[in-house]
Amino acid sequence: MQDASNIMRLLGAIAAIIVGSGGIIALFYVANLVVNRLPPRPRSQILPWVYMVPALVMLGAFLVLPTLRTILLSFMDRRSQGWVGLDNYIFAFTNADMLIAFRNNVLWLVLVTGVSVGLGLVIAVLVDRVKYEPLAKALIFLPMAISFVGASVIWRFMYAYQPPGTDQIGLLNAIAVALGYEPIGWLVNKSVNNFALIAIMIWLQTGFAMVLLSSAVKGIPKDVIEAARIDGASEFQIFWRITIPMISSTIVVVSTTIIVLVLKVFDIVFVMTGGNLDTDVIASRMIKEMFNFRNFGRGSAIAVVLLLAVIPVMVTNIRRFQQQEANR
Amino acid sequence: MAHIVFEQVTKQYDNGFVAVKDLNLEIGDDEFLVLVGPSGCGKTTSLRMLAGLESISRGSLYIDGQRVNEKSPRERDIAMVFQSYALYPHMSVFENMAFGLQLQGTAKPEIQQRVQAAAAQLGIEELLDRKPKQLSGGQRQRVAVGRAIVRDPSAFLMDEPLSNLDAKLRVQARAELTKLHKKLGTTFIYVTHDQVEAMTMGSRIAVMNQGILQQVDTPQNLYEHPNNMFVAGFMGSPAMNFFEATLTQTGEQMVIDAGALQLPVPEEVRSRYQSLLGTPLIFGIRPENIYNPEFAPPGINPVAIEATVSVVEMMGHEEIVYFALGDGHEFLARVDPRSRFTPGESVSVSFDMNRFHLFDKASEHVLVS
Ligand SMILES: Nc1ncnc2c1ncn2[C@@H]1O[C@H](COP(=O)(O)OP(=O)(O)O)[C@@H](O)[C@H]1O
Ligand SMILES: [Mg+2]
């Protein structure tokens, strides 16, 4: 019985894929046929739209509408029944827990972006001169392949805490104890728990930063570096005055990508600490308000705040990208 | 000004390939030395060793009497113009030229003044605010030279700096570099695969082949007295004609016997050739030493040779003619444009027996030239 329904489900999924992708192909095919019948003048004006409209409809239905609805909900009460004006936003910017979340998010943004990009850059430049470069890069890149939840599970073991006197099963505390220190409650000690979480994100993102930056570093012509060397530049001066300016657009893109990722992060917090003990970030507050406390108004308001925070970053990114295209 | 000495310098790359072997070369204070040779012969490698960009496997390199094998590029006080120009793409022309001075800690007003002066010298003053991307090939080449001269180094190294320019610009840039050398009076070491560049620019030319230095001499001497078949064939375009030959003596007559070519040796020099009788030889003669008898100048020692015209290339100021001998051997001559040879025609041409070269067939080394 169970098996049969599973098979039915599988068949259903396959059918959906075939119908879905087949349908899209058919849609484009038919639209193309129709447009090609038109005289050339209107055709060249209509043709681009034929290809763009389906995508625009999808985006509208699944992205723009929900966004608009979220904005609407953010001005309503917890059940979305009455208007409350800016109350939810006032809550978002004044509530003590929210303020802690904001503080934590700033910490996350600065540390994750700064350290991952900085470390990624240094490794990218150093690894360029290492014999086993592919191996070294693969090792550093590997965490990228792990989901946030998976990484969190791994790090729970790293941070595991047992009372003093018992065997430490967490790697960090085992080292701490072996060196003669007291075991540290990495996830419960309020002075370190945020940093413990941030370290996980850095571990995950350094590889990403390194791989992109490394390919940018490799794109710098060898001649240019050698010209600088002949001009009398030390390796350090070459790094600051040639390498970094020449890959600055990649640095910006990598940084903004990581910033957006950090703004969205909640899984690590959720799995590791559940946001307790002052470790909440904005996104995890949003989930809590929305689904734990069932306050749709507040949840939506926080979501809108997050959205607004991302917009300038995206604008920078797009502008940078256009610049780069123009420079090609 | 720098006095540079390569002493038994060898470069073996990590993969075991020996790119330069036992290079011995002395370059004087204000010389314009051209390092020439076919692609892959080790010119760039030699230059990079001098610049300090490539380590030296064996031997010693001296600049002004000081052994510099272990010195970094910045300690050698040299400048280099790369084939790709290697301008810093994120810097303006001014910044490109100022970079080296900034690193030396030169004061701002002095940098300003020196960059301006160098730019004026090269006629690139109005380009100072542009980025390299906004420059033409010829302008980039000037900026690359400007970046080198602004530092006032003791030697300039140039690796095929003109090879990315079109033919007309190249001729112009050639003359400008020669002028620049005269004005600066500094050591220039110029790498090229183009023997015309070498001949026109070098005060001395070093010819390399397969990692081995073949000959170093003035353009004139190199052309007239090549050490071996490689140098003889490489310098000069079209290249020297070679024929396998032996020297034979019948009675009073001494003849260079190259099959269909039978060339009597001039009486005055016969005694010098006595020892070569019977040795397998290569006879070499340059295309310009073969004449159409109608337009042959006085003072040559003509020997008439019957040959068939196979191809004629009319160059305007001369005719390059491919001839075939009765035994199928081919040779090439640069003759007077009034000759108007036509393909298929059988003609008589004059070999100037005052201007030929004999090489040992086994060693390819010159015996007489
Ligand atoms: N890094 C390297 N490793 C191994 N072989 C090299 C390396 N660089 C150059 N070579 C080889 O050394 C020879 C000389 O190179 P190069 O000095 O660049 O020649 P040129 O400048 O005269 O054309 C070439 O055969 C080239 O393939
Ligand atoms: Mg080269």
Image (tube, coloured by chain):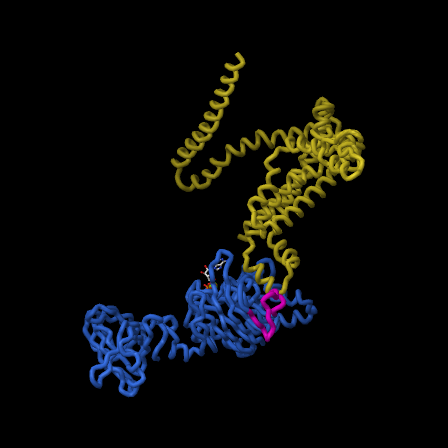
Chain colours: A yellow, B blue
Residue A283 place in picture, x, y as percent: 70, 32
Q: Nearer the viewer, residue A202 or A171?
A: A171
Query: In the rendered view, does A136 fall on the left or right side of B205?
Result: right
Residue B368 versus residue B21 in the image, above or below: below
Instruction: Quadrant for residue A73, please give it.
Output: top right
Give the quarter of the figure containing the C terminus of chain B.
Answer: bottom left
Query: Which residue is depicted at the point 31% across and 79% down?
Result: B356
Q: Quadrant of residue B93?
A: bottom right
- Residue A320, position as x, y percentages in the image: 60, 48
Between B84 and A38, the residue placed more toward the observer is B84
Q: Could you say where residue A124 lies in the image, as x and y percent from the top left? A: 61, 49
Q: Quadrant of residue B255?
A: bottom left
Residue B70 lies in the magenta stretch: yes
Q: Residue at x 58, y 67 (%)?
A: B69
In the visual, does A219 lie left or right of B305?
A: right
Instruction: Find residue A61 and report its horizontal and vertical position in percent.
Output: 57, 29
Please tell me which residue is depicted at 43% across the width and 65% down the height of the picture.
B210
Q: Is residue A303 visible?
A: no
> Magenta segment range?
B60-76
Compare residues A294 and A7 and report the one nearer the observer: A7
- Please say whether residue A23 is one of the residues in the magenta stretch: no
**Count of marks, rendered view:** 0
* Nearest to the observer: residue A54 or residue B303: B303
Kindly tell me whether residue B11 is visible in this rendering. yes
Q: Is residue B160 left or right of residue B266?
A: right
| In the rendered image, the vertical position of residue B172 relative to residue B253, given as above or below | above
Vertical arrangement, residue B189 with respect to residue A181, above or below: below
Q: Residue at x 58, y 76 (%)?
A: B1
Residue at far top of view: A1
